[in-house]
Amino acid sequence: MTGATGQDGSYLIELLLAKGYEVHGIIRRASLFNTERIDHVYQDPHETGARFFGHYGDMTDGSVLARLVEEIKPDEVYNLAAQSHVRVSFDLPDYTADTTAMGALRLLDALRDHVQRTAREVRYYQAGSSEMFGAAPAPQDESTPFYPPQSLRRGQGGGPLVWRELPRILWPVHL
């Protein structure tokens, strides 16, 4: 799971652990610790029965994503990673797009390569936001065009745009 230390990621970790899953979460390294939302589910990975494992990584580093996919061999991948701070998205629009849109593409590329090499089935979930539709009238569905009106929304819409517009690159990855 990417975005493990975010609000949605921490709730999803709790849900998956309650369902008996082994959960691997990618934690973006920062100068300050950013794990307070998941500290309560952490166990020493060397203890018997540990089912949550944190891995340092970043959506801007495709080689790390590929290495983690190969090491973990996931059955399901949940991409919740996004640079979603409003002020930062305006100040750093290239970083926002690189992290969110290109990050999703890097992860999908790593999954495609893994699936082609191993013939394993991997399911992929891409988180999104209603903001990616902008002013599109309700109700919205998978065929509603994206109309993101600002840089934050362009960044948040990038991940879903990648999986919706470029699915042919994935072949065996189930979206």
Image (cartoon, rainbow, N blue to C red):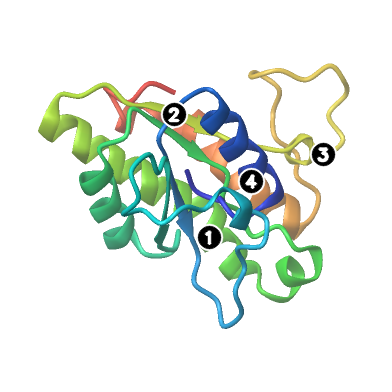
Q: Give the residue type at disc 2.
A: Tyr
Q: Identify residue for label 4.
A: 10
Q: Position of residue 41 (x, y in %)?
A: 57, 48
Q: Is residue 11 something one can see in this rendering?
A: yes
Q: Secondary structure at mark 1?
A: helix
Residue 1 x/y as whole percent: 47, 43
> In the image, residue 42 lies at what x, y percent?
52, 53
Above or below, comparing residue 17 to residue 30 in the picture: above
Residue drawn 38% across the image and 39% down it? 49
Considering only vertical position in the picture, is 151 above or below 91? above
| Alpha carbon separation for disc pair 4 and 2 | 14 Å
Q: Secondary structure at mark 2?
A: loop
Of mark 3 and mark 1, the one earlier in the sequence is: 1
Mark 1 or mark 2, whichever is nearer to me: 2
Q: Is residue 75 left or right of residue 86?
A: left
As drawn, which residue projects farthest toward the left?
117
Task: Classify mark 4: helix, strand or loop.
Answer: helix
Q: Tell whether label 2 touches label 4 (CB within 8 Å).
A: no
Residue located beneath label 1 in the image: 99
Q: Amino acid at mark 3?
A: Gly
Q: Which residue is mark 2?
A: 21
Please name whichever residue, 87 or 26, is drawn nearer the observer in this view of the structure. 26
The residue located at (36%, 41%) in the rendering is 108
**Residue 83's mark?**
none
